[in-house]
Image (spheres, coloured by chain):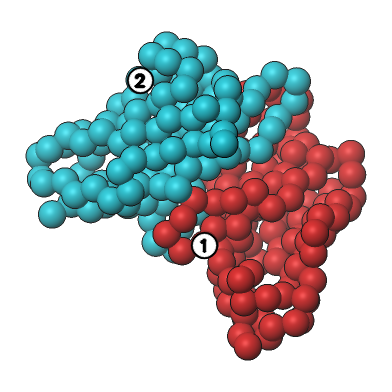
Chain colours: A red, B cyan
């Protein structure tokens, strides 16, 4: 079953505001986490990833925070734009040090950006 | 440009027919995966393969079959045994080896039963 879940299935923000999308995971053995963006009718696109030896990682307008104490992952999008409207998925590997490569996906959060 | 290509983009299947979805990658990735996505749902793993001529069942393999005769190709056949095949199908690939790497996804195939 799924161990990666989302606190909210939908999130609406106004253009220019910051967005925070949350994800909870239950497997303390997970040591790799990744966020994907999926636009309607398209395949998911890589946004950012983080390994368990880090608490924070920044990309272009995005930041991923990892709180291993409470098994929580978040994606922050700065100055949200209409083009950010999509479904966002988090995923974890569940198997520390494994070379299997399998990722386990959450159900996703639909982000809608209003002008 | 390197990437992963799925075809066709749209596919229609009649009751009782088998259909095959194509997935090709030129990224030299070792592992390939097939996921099914239903409206408002996450990604559910159908099959995956780590090396040529070997593949493993995922969480919802019943009614599906795959082959991995070449590193670059991982076709998925949706058989007549799959009772509810209408869905969006996603193929992905990844490197393997030291540690884990993220997936690269294809653009998907939307299968509809008519």
Instruction: Determine the secondary structure under disc 1.
Output: loop
Q: Residue at the spot x=19%, y=49% of the render?
A: B12
The reply to whether the C-beta atoms of the residues labelled 2 and 1 are less than 8 Å apart is: no
| Distance from Cα at disc 2 to Cα at disc 1 | 29 Å
Q: Residue at the spot x=58%, y=22% of the render?
A: B28
Viewer-closest of A88 and A69: A88
- Of all chains, the one bearing label 1 is A
Q: Position of residue B107 (x, y in %)?
A: 45, 48
Q: Which residue is mark 1?
A: A39
Q: Position of residue B110 (x, y in %)?
A: 32, 51
The local crowd at label 2, few if under 14, some if 14 to 19, many if 20 or more residues have their Cα within 10 Å, is: some
| Residue at the top extreme of this rendering | B53
Viewer-closest of B108 and A28: B108
- Of all chains, the one bearing label 2 is B
Total marks drawn? Answer: 2
Q: Position of residue A100 (x, y in %)?
A: 62, 24
Instruction: Determine the secondary structure under disc 2.
Output: loop
- B43 horizontally vs A65: left or right: left
* Eye-nearest disc, 2 or 1: 1
Dividing the picture into quadrants, the one containing residue B82 is: top left
Q: Which residue is mark 2?
A: B67
Q: Position of residue A64 (x, y in %)?
A: 80, 56
- B10 horizontally vs A100: left or right: left
- B53 horizontally vs A77: left or right: left
């Amino acid at each position: 079953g799924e161990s990666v879940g989302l606190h909210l299935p939908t999130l609406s923000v106004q253009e220019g505001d910051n967005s925070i999308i949350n994800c909870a995971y239950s497997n303390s053995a997970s040591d790799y986490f990744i966020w994907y963006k999926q636009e309607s009718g398209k395949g998911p696109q890589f946004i950012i990833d983080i390994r368990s030896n880090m608490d924070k990682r920044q990309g272009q307008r995005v930041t991923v925070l990892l709180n291993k104490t409470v098994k929580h992952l978040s994606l922050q999008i700065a100055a949200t734009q209409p083009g950010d409207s999509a479904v966002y998925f988090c995923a974890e590997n569940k198997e520390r040090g494994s070379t299997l490569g399998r990722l386990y996906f959450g159900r996703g959060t639909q982000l809608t950006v209003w002008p | 440009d390197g990437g992963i290509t799925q075809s066709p983009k749209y596919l229609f299947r009649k009751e009782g027919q088998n259909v095959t979805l194509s997935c090709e990658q030129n990224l030299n990735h070792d592992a390939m995966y097939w996921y099914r996505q239903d409206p408002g749902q996450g990604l559910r793993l159908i099959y995956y393969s780590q090396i040529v001529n070997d593949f493993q069942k995922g969480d919802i393999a019943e009614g599906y079959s795959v082959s991995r005769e070449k590193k670059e190709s991982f076709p998925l056949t949706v058989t007549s045994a799959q009772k509810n095949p209408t869905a969006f199908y996603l193929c992905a690939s990844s490197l393997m080896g030291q540690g884990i790497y993220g997936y690269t996804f294809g653009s998907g195939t939307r299968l509809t039963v008519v």
